[in-house]
Image: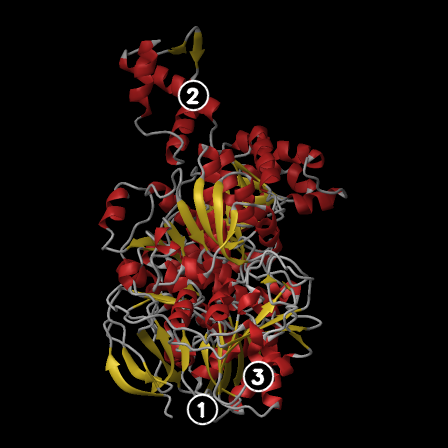
Amino acid sequence: MSKYDKITTNAVGRVVPQIINGKEAVPFLGVGKFRPTGRKYAPLISTCADFPDDGNKTVPSLREALIRCGLKDGMTISTHHHFRNGDLVGNQIFDAAAELGIKNLTWAPSASFECHSPLIKYLEDGTIHHIEGSMNGALGKFTSEGGMQGMGVLRSHGGRYQAIQDGDLHVDIAVIAAPTADAFGNATGDRGSAACGLLGFALADSQYADKVIVVTDNLVPFPCVPWQIHGNYVDFVVVLDRVGIPEKIISGTTEITKSPDRLLLAELTAQFCDETGIVRDGFSFQAGAGGTALSIGIYFAEMLRKRGMKARFARGGSNKYLVKMLEEGLVDYILDGQTFDLEGVRSMRENSGHLNTSPFTSYNYHGKGNFASMVDVVILGATEVDINFNANVVTHSDGYLLHGIGGWMNCLFSKCVILPIPLFRDRMPVIRDQVTTICGPGELIDVIVTERGIAINPLRTDLIDKLKGSSLPIKSIHQLKEEAERICGKPSLPVLSDEFIAAIKWVDGTVIDAVRKVII
Amino acid sequence: MPDVTLHLIENANLNPLNQEADVATIATTGNKGKGIRSDCQVTLEIRKSGGIDIQLVSKVKVMYGDSILSLCNEIFKFYNITDASLLLEDSGALEPVIAARLEAAIRQLTGSTKEYLTELLPQNNYQTARDRDRFSRLYLPGNSPALMINAGIHKPNGIILDLEDAVAVSKKEEARFLVRNALRTIDFYGAERMVRINQVPAGIADLDYIIPHNVNLILVPKCESADQIRQVNSRIKEIKEAKGISGNIWLMPIIESAMGVLKALEIASSENVVALAIGLEDYTADLGTRRTNEGTESFFARSMVVNACKAAGIQAIDSVFSDIADMEALKQNVLRSKALGFDGMGCIHPRQIRVIHDNFAPDEAEIDKAKKIVNAFIDATDKGLGVVSLGTKMIDPPVVKRAQHTINLAISMGKLDAEWRVEFVEAESKK
């Protein structure tokens, strides 16, 4: 099987394959243009006659659970990233598979982290054929340099739900690491020594995978409540000594920034939202886990407090700052998609206004609406933006694939999308003639806030009108690009191979871009 | 009096290695390693044969590898170097930084005094007024390029490129090239461009690298006499004449010792001095006491400096506040400082700038009072009256001048509308 075939040019002018790892793929047709047909994917019907009446589904080891799930060559195994860089389960699955001599697996994580770098040896020896999820850090470098046998597939959080629901991504065995579970398979993330908040990323897998294994280090007597994952979907439960490293589960980016340059970005962004009337009584926002985004939340809180107003809801990435807003009455609800610190976990247990969401409710493009498009303003990052406001989050300007998409693509449907980004990082200008990889089409990206000026997408005449006479440093994106190049010099473009190593799937499953191998 | 009539050229190289140029063949300049950004380390060996060999290790090699190599080749050509081995370990340094590092290495090895000057930005060519606002002046270590590039975007009134305490002794020489290139090529977006030289007499030699490159103000540390200021002025004058430079270069001596405090008035009254600053870390050490947040131990010194400045008609600038995390303590410190009569304060982190500006700025009560006085003055002038009065009180011209200054400040800091008088007169007429 060749990695890819049938090259074409898609609606944003990117050259992409139409066959990826032997499967048909639709090239990106434009935002909202692809209309799915048919019915959702369905897992096999089970009968409780095959499961113990006493509800005890425990088996002695992960290896045995995998064997009893019928693990064989070519299967797809999924994992989830709610333990972030503290995950102890993902690597063990493939250690067991390699011991059993299994080959050509597809690994479908909701995201990968540095802690998964040891899996490179299984990509090298053929235990794992390719990754569908994200390829971060060392895995990304390995992929970029052409090390992976198959073609990598990157999806957003919502895109992953969509792909599993639509049958684009069939999961044979889902392994759900759970901070607390009972022997029936009910599981929760809001308590236990590896408490991580919620398990929303595993929802699709529990619903659609052929076999589901829950792995925990905190087995409680039935019932485990709240049952974020329903045991009725679960085949086996495995108890390990430890499933995660608590201090690494807490994300490294949940402190507000101390960098004066980033604080300036946050301040300019907050002022922008204020002057355009976005910050008002009953508004909603989503700010990610990065230091700049967190600081913007703090500026929002200050404005609300001063004016006696409150936000209706905030989408998280929850963290202590958002929890403080909730508990202070500055926001009615946190709609949490991923819990970034222990304060978030505590709040989820204690506050009725702190709600569990999943990629299904928040992001899935093939549903009857989702929460992301109802948010008034979302603050996101990017590695690059081009003069047409197209943005990149997965590759660097040297062509290396180093990041996953996360919920970034899904969030682009918010009413106002703002990217606060430094005009250059060290000597790397962020605004380019053309992004190395398109992850988001420019029509969905409204504002670029840099320390040396703010560029508004010309399509957003409403925002431009509202800021007439503002003291904010409004500039064109071309002016910003020229300013960066005056300081840094004009960068050369990387010379990349013709060979593709990974595909970037848009929120509807179409291929928006493909990443090329770097030449070393 | 130390000899300050050194020739520019002879004085240009202070590196002891140079005295043994035929022995030392390898020079290392710049910085590398964890936490180093926007800088590079140059390891240069000048050889007798073999041509130019450049090894570039850079995170921006794909984007700027070719341009970095051509810059290095150009610099080698400029210094007539035909045989050398260069290892350039780059963490995203901009061109003026790479050029400064390579020039420092070459001059260390060859003893050359030729200057490889990077582009002088036209927007960097400005003068500053003697009495301009100097609420905040941001200290930047003179050998750390990463902090220089974005310093101006935080809008301090002044930016100090520090050659003195913030630079390790072994890095003093190379820092001069970096500071010089920064003055030429980095846009500080209108901030007053300041350099703190080393203590006189050693600091006199720093001036050669600074004066010809659009510096607005020189900070003279640990100043203890008017004579030291005379030495600085005289050297500046020589350089200006030699290079045909016009325009003012102001001085801000820093009082950092008991002797300095006692000589404050003669220093404040010296030529080109526009402000005295006080440095309390060294001062308290000199007194043999410890610096406290309340500042009781430095009350005399601060008051002496303020009084000397006011007597000489110049600005008084307070010491830096070193706890960069505690904005509330900084605010209290600024308010105390303002109450003592200081006009500004140093800062060591951009986050302090806003707090310093906001609290040195006139407060509501001061603005209200100033509005009344300025309004009374305009009324009196309109009516052709020689005497300005407010209610039953006569107002002296210096009070009017100060009120006008308060109003101008409030307007420039966005605390008052430029057309304030329209509303004011209307409100007064309704009373």
Q: Chain of mark 1?
A: B
Q: Chain of mark 3?
A: B
**Residues at badges 1 and 2 in contact (C-beta under 8 Å)?**
no
Which residue is disc 3 drawn over? B25
Label 1 in the same subunit as label 2: yes
Q: Quadrant of residue A145?
A: bottom left
Is residue A157 visible in the rendered image? The answer is yes
Name the residue at the right extreme: B288
Quarter of the image where the C terminus of chain A is located: bottom left
Mark 1 is surrounded, within 10 Å at the Cα level, by few (under 14), some (14 to 19) or many (20 or more) other residues, namely few
What amino acid is found at the position of numbered circle 3 in the picture? Thr
Q: Quadrant of residue A404?
A: bottom left
Q: Position of residue A256 (x, y in %)?
A: 54, 52
Q: Chain of mark 2?
A: B
Q: CA distance from mark 2 to mark 3?
A: 68 Å
The residue nearer to you, when weighing B6 against A85, is A85
Which residue is disc 1 drawn over? B51
What amino acid is found at the position of numbered circle 1 in the picture? Gly
Label whose residue precedes the other's in the sequence (2 or 3):
3
Quarter of the image where the N terminus of chain A is located: bottom left
Q: Nearer the viewer, mark 2 or mark 3?
A: 2
Which residue is disc 2 drawn over? B368
Residue at point 43%, 37% (across, down): B131
Q: For numbered disc 2, what is the local secondary structure? A: helix
Label 1 in the same subunit as label 3: yes
B8 is higher (above) or lower (below) than B248: below
